[in-house]
Image (cartoon, grey):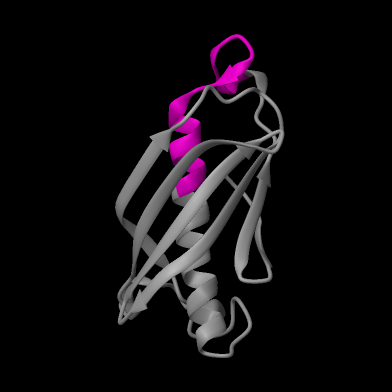
Amino acid sequence: MHIRSYWDGEESVAIFQPKPYHTAVPGYVYGGLIASLLDCHGTGTAAAADYRADGREMGTKLEYRYVTAGLRVDYLKPTPLVALEVRGWVTEIKDRKVIVAMELRAGGEVCAQGEVVAVQMPEDWVPRLDEK
């Protein structure tokens, strides 16, 4: 999805502008896009939270990478084809697991909620910055 997430206090935020091909029915995005945005933002937030907890800048050696162990999405209302905002907050950090709760908003209205259970990838699976 190539989304860019950033911190807004204790919440993580990403903005995504869907394209016309992201529609289910004219004027509304399809549910798979919503799930993908929550998934991507959730794992990115997990990594950022881990860096933050360690007092490190994003992307510094050794890199933290997270994958999805669980994804829950609750679709609350149809989501119009407008700029979408995803907000997340960490509800748990324990060992190699981070749980992130999220809301997806369109025009300020919450259209979906979700949760990602993210787990840190083993160190030997992550390419080193100096090997890129």
Q: Residue furthest bottom?
A: 55
Q: Residue at x 30, y 82 (%)?
A: 95
Q: Is residue 131 visible?
A: no
Q: Does residue 83 show up magenta in the picture?
A: no
Closest to the observer: 10 or 116? 10
Q: Residue at x 70, y 35 (%)?
A: 17
Image coordinates for residue 51, horizontal then vertical, percent = 53, 81
Q: Is residue 27 visible?
A: yes
Image coordinates for residue 57, horizontal then vertical, percent = 63, 83
Q: Is residue 23 above or below residue 120?
A: above
Closest to the observer: 2 or 68? 68
Image coordinates for residue 114, horizontal then vertical, percent = 42, 46
Closest to the observer: 7 or 9? 9
From the image, which quarter does the N terminus lie in?
Answer: top right
Q: Does residue 34 show up magenta in the picture?
A: yes
**On the image, which quarter does residue 132 sit in?**
bottom right
Asked whether, in this view, residue 3 is left or right of residue 36, the answer is right
Q: Is residue 92 above or below residue 53?
A: above
Q: Residue at x 61, y 71 (%)?
A: 10
Magenta highlight range: 21-38
**On the image, which quarter does residue 111 sit in?**
top right
